[in-house]
Each structure stands twice: as C-alpha cells, then as structure tokens.
Image (cartoon, rainbow, N blue to C red):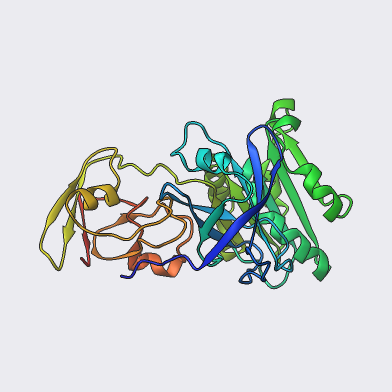
C-alpha cells in the first residue's frame, strides 16, 4: 500500500469570520493559476504545519477554478486540527491533497439536503450546481439557534426563495427526520451531513431508500474499541491485542506495523486495508459499500467478534 502525497501548494488569501467558532479560508495558487477541478460534494486533505492532516469539504462553486474555500468549526475538545486551522494567518502556505468526492450529486431527481451545524459545508458546493441545472431541491439547516447558524447569510444570495428551511432546536423547531423521510418521493435523493446522532436516526428511518440515501458525518463515530479483541496478521503471523478504548490503527503502530494514514477520521481512506477473516465494525464515512466486504479502515473501524485477520 502506498501512502498518498499532497499535490497542491496554496496560500491563504482570505480568512472570513462566519461566527464565533467558524472560520472560512480562501486558498489559492501563489501565482493565481487555476487549481485542480472538483465536483460538488468533494473534500480535500489539508496538511497542517504541525504534521496533522485533516479533511474538509470544499465550500465554493466548482465552477470557480481560481480558489478553494473551506469552513472550519473550532472544537476546543477535539483532536487539535481545528484549533490549528483557526490559528493560521493570511499569507501562510499549506499543502493539499487533490480533491476527492465520496458524496457526489446524483445525476437526476429532486435533491433534499439536511445539514447539522458545520455539516452544511458540502452543500455549499452543491447549491450553485443545482441552481444552474434548474433542478428541484430543498435545503434543511439544523442549528441550536440563530447565533449558532453560521451559514444562512452566506446562502441568501445564491438560493431561490423557499428552498432554505431553518430548524432551530433551541426554539422548539427541531427537524422531524421521520416526517421528512416519509415525504420523500420515489425519484428523490436525500443527502445528510452532520453529527452521529442525526446520521444514525436517518440510517434507521431511511433504510428503505437504499442508494438514494447519501450520508457524511463531520467526525468519526466513536473510534475507540468498545471491547478488547485480537488482530491477526496473515502474512507475518503476528497476533496484536487491541485494548478497550484503543483504535486498531494505534495497536498496529504500537506493534511496529507501518500503516499509512492521513485524516484518521475515516474520510480519506489512506489506511484502507484488506481483511481475510472476521467481522469488522465499519465506522468510516467514505468507503463504498461494495468494498466493505473485503476492506476496512483501521483508523476508525473495529471488530464485532473476538478477532479479525488482516492481509498484513
């Protein structure tokens, strides 16, 4: 397995304060060349000066080729990446991966988008595309209150009247996901991006939608092992214990097994590894369903049984 490398060097052209905790960065080539193209719903990996790598959705119209925009929520209790982004300054240079898309727009049909807080970010690139196509869509924005809503003002100029619906839980206007899914037509596609609780509820209620239900979490779903298990290495013959609260990736690294990884949040798939036996607990947010019969992401995935065998 070969570790992916960055392909783009950019500078921070502008930093915009969208709310107390959300900053939007505009990234551009130093000589103002066009950047590699991307499609609506795409993300990229940002290589921070400390060596951390974090994945962020692209927030601008894909037709805008001279810059990328990302919006980052500062999470003081997080793993440190967002705090580092908020400390960056205009003019600093960053290394980026090429854009990748695990949440592409369906080619046809009405699109219903549901954003939980910072989960709005991938939809900021979808709305302009849907507008140009003249396709029917609606966008549901869920936040605690208007102060926690960092995106309404940004959306206002680009969105048609009646297409944006705000749901502020602090005022008793929480989104009824069950009612929303019950009203989905036979050709409609539903896209959700937000916290684990919202995604899990939608997965349960929307199971009948099959491939018309598209989801992306903005953080990993409980990455530590809930119970101890053993990772067996088919090629080297080793047996590596994974303790409660530990990730499979951390256990492998502690045992001297070199696993390439970037985001460590189940987004970039750099650590994608083949398994041969056992039942993985898939917790990534990007791997195609068909690939889950043969591969897992050790940065966030676990084991449902007592052991799992990897092709290592």
- Which residue in the rendered view is the most extreme toward the top? 171
**Quarter holding residue 296:** bottom left
Image coords of residue 74 (percent x, y): 57, 37
- Nearer to me, 90 or 276: 90
Residue 229 placement (x, y as % from top left): 20, 47
Residue 102 visible from this viewpoint? no
Closer-to-camera residue (75/275): 75
* Residue in the picture at 43% in, 53% down: 263
Residue 172 placed where, x, y %? 73, 28
Left or right: residue 279 versus residue 215 is left
Above-or-below relation of 87 to 133: above
Residue at the farthest left position: 237
Q: Nearer the viewer, residue 196 or 247?
A: 247
Q: Percent from the top left, x then y, of residue 297?
A: 36, 58
Q: Quadrant of the C terminus?
A: bottom left
> Residue at position x 84%, y 48% from top?
156
**What residue is at 68 percent from the left and 67 percent from the top?**
32
- Residue displayed at 33% across by 41% down: 224
Q: Quadrant of the N terminus?
A: bottom left
**Camera sees residue 75:** yes
Total label count? 0
Q: Is residue 163 left or right of residue 255?
A: right
For this orientation, the residue located farthest to the right is 161
235 and 278: which is toward the camera: 235
């Amino acid at each position: 397995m070969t570790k992916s490398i960055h392909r783009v060097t950019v500078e921070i052209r502008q930093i915009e304060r969208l709310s107390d905790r959300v900053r939007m960065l505009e990234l551009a080539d130093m000589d103002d060349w066009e950047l590699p193209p991307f499609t609506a719903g795409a993300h990229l990996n940002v290589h921070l000066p400390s060596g951390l790598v974090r994945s962020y959705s692209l927030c601008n119209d894909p037709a805008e080729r001279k810059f990328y925009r990302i919006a980052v929520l500062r999470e003081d209790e997080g793993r440190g990446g967002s705090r580092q982004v908020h400390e960056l300054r205009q003019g600093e240079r960053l290394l980026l991966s090429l854009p990748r898309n695990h949440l592409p727009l369906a080619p046809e049909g009405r699109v219903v988008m549901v954003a939980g807080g910072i989960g709005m970010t991938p939809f900021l690139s979808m709305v302009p595309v849907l507008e140009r196509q003249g396709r029917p869509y609606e966008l549901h924005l869920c936040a605690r209150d208007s102060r926690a809503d960092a995106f309404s003002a940004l959306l206002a100029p680009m969105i048609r009247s009646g297409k944006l619906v705000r749901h502020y839980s602090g005022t008793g206007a929480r989104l009824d996901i069950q009612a929303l899914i019950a009203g989905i037509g036979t050709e409609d596609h539903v896209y959700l991006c937000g916290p684990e609780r919202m995604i899990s509820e939608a997965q349960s209620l929307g199971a009948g939608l099959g491939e018309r239900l598209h989801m992306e979490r903005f953080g990993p779903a409980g990455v530590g092992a809930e119970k101890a298990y053993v990772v067996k290495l088919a090629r080297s013959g080793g047996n590596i214990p994974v303790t409660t609260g530990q990730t499979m990736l951390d256990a492998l690294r502690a045992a001297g097994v070199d696993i390439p990884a970037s985001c460590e949040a189940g987004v970039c798939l750099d650590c994608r590894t083949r398994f041969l036996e056992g039942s993985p607990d898939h917790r990534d947010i990007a791997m195609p369903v068909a690939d889950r019969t043969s591969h897992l992401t050790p940065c966030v995935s676990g084991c449902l049984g007592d052991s799992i065998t990897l092709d290592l």
